[in-house]
Image: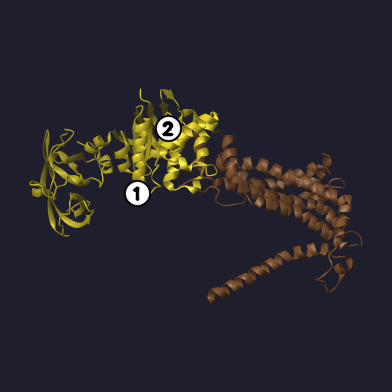
Amino acid sequence: MQTTLGRTLHALGLTLVILFTMFPFYWMVTSSLKDQSDLLASPPVWLFVPTLEHYGEIFADQKVVNAVINSLIVSVSTTALAVLLGAPAAYALARFEFRGKQDLWFWFISNRMISPIVLALPVYLLALQVKLLDTHLVLILIYLTFNLPIVVWICTDQFRSIPKELEQAARLDGANQWIIFRKIYVPLGIPGIAVSAIFSFIFSWNELLYALVLTRRTVQTAPVIATSFMSGYELPWGKIMATGTVIVLPVIIFALLVSKHMVRGLTMGATK
Amino acid sequence: MSFLRLDNVVKRYGDHKVINGVSFGAEKGEFVVFVGPSGCGKSTLLRMIAGLEDITEGDVSIDGAVVTNVEPAARQVAMVFQSYALYPHMSVFENMAFGLRMVKTPQPEIERRVKEAARILQIEPLLERKPRQLSGGQRQRVAIGRAIVRNPKLFLFDEPLSNLDAELRTQMRVEIARLHRDIGATMVYVTHDQIEAMTLADRIVVLRAGLVEQVGAPTELYDNPANTFVAGFIGSPKMNFLTGTVTAAETGRVMVANANFVGGSLVIRPRRGGVPKVGDMVIVGLRPEHLDLASPTPALQLRTDFAENLGGATQIYTQPKDGEMITIVAQGRPKITPGETLTVGVAPEYVYLFDERGVAV
């Protein structure tokens, strides 16, 4: 009896949490499929005839298509660079002893302690002076400074969990440092690398503040475009929601693709 | 010159000396076992030979070449780790082939050597499996196979059997001995288990606190331990010790007084020919298996505490009037009642004598 009641309450609680977290997403997707009169109806309508009108509108808008492409360029480049640079750094932090290691470790994460808005103006002025405003590169560079620490932290932890004997065995087998990293640490660190890549991609994809400050026309990213609809006296909810849905899709696809690598127990069988 | 030579090797971590100047040589084809209690530095010493630990002072040479500052791979040694250290994401075949691939061995040669090693170790059906699909004993075989395929100058084993259960340990012990016989390679084996040391070794190196206590063939260490540490470490159950005072001494004949001896004293023939001074404190060593309940010439009187019946033999624990418990191993199942006083004999050639510091005399 007790367990049945417990299970029921458990399920109920979980359902509430899921409803609470999923509802905004549900509302966004359904709103993007409503026509203007359904959108503004009060009380809100739950049953309606879906329309793809807003999607047609945004895909006809070259600005939106360009923004999605810009976002893709920036996010993919940032994520690739963050992993390419972060994973070797994490390996060094996990396995080598060198002077200032602990300080470096702390310093890596310290830039995440500062509120992004504090740095926005200095970064803007810097970008202005080196003539990087409104380029993909400036966004990639600034996102890297935010994403590298995350990649380094997650991967360091992951690499530390790999038994040291594996590296020693490989050294005796004649593998050099680079081969050990590539053949032992990367394959076994894939879960950590995958998680950090997802974080990195989501951050770069959704980032609004710096994208707003550092871009003008040419490299506006998707979140910038979505908010740009909210101007003047007009609030084209359908268009905003459709853009929002389109923005969320790549993240979900990327996360689904990568998440199959997020498995535990890769090092099972190595020792004992 | 020895095939493997350690020349006054020292390992220091900061101010802490782990290896305290070890010199030792092993001949080609010899099976050498480093044995000692945990923390004695035996694994560190092995890792220094492998090149996984830096050598603070001294030199290591293999096959006539000093390798003190040579990279592990270039030393042409193979090591079997206590934890096996198999590459978990690679198949058994790839685990064994990894070292060969590193030196760009042609694929047909890799296949030939891996298959050959798999045949020797009877793991041929497992070649496509991942380490996680193997049992402990199978993993251990793969780890050994990984060492064999590289055809190294020197095999190093770091407590390879300590993760296995008792039955499998015995089985693998025999297989390692057979492997040594078949391939005839030089092997250095680290263990804290004196039975493994006794059964596998051509020569045993007994280590304590980073120092070599004694080097010798298993029987030599058993028959002629250099000190109480080696005497207590080699042999199972461990040697019994009684402290006594010398009451009379001449060459080849020392009389030692102790309340547990029949008549209060025992005449001992020192095995190393030493002559202690009258009044000196000495330690008398007696192996449990040498104490004889049926001896016509009793030497000790001991009060029984309890007895363990092992089937073929019985271990009797007795409490002497002073000092630690004394163990007796008796064949068969003698009838023992707790509290009973036993008179026990021992052949004169089986009595060991050590001076106050524990050095054999």
Q: Nearer the viewer, residue B222 or B147?
A: B147
According to the image, label 1 marks what residue?
Answer: B166
Where A190 sits versus B66, above or below?
below
Amino acid type shown at disc 1: Ala
Q: Colour of chain A?
A: brown
Q: Which mark is residue B128?
A: none
Q: The disc numbered 2 marks a residue on which chain? A: B
Residue B93, position as x, y percentages in the image: 51, 38
Q: Determine if residue B85 is in view.
A: no
Q: Residue at x 19, y 46 (%)?
A: B289
Residue placed at 17% from the left, 56% from the top? B304
**Whole-number angstrom distance, CA of label 1 to CA of label 2:** 29 Å
* Number of marks in picture: 2
The residue mark sitting in front, 1 or 2, is 1
Instruction: Check disc 2 and report its element: helix, strand or loop.
Output: helix
Image quadrant holding the C terminus of chain B, namely top left
Question: Quarter of the image containing the N terminus of chain B?
Answer: top left
* Chain that bears disc 1: B
Q: Position of residue B317 (x, y in %)?
A: 21, 54
Above or below, comparing residue A260 to residue B75 in the picture: below
Residue A169 in picture, x, y percent from top left? 49, 38
Q: Seen in the image, is B125 located left or right of residue B282?
A: right
- Is residue A42 visible in the rendered image? The answer is yes
Q: Is B169 in front, or is B322? A: B169
Image colour for chain B is: yellow
User: Which residue position holds label 2?
Assistant: B49
Which numbered disc flags the more N-terminal residue, 1 or 2? Answer: 2
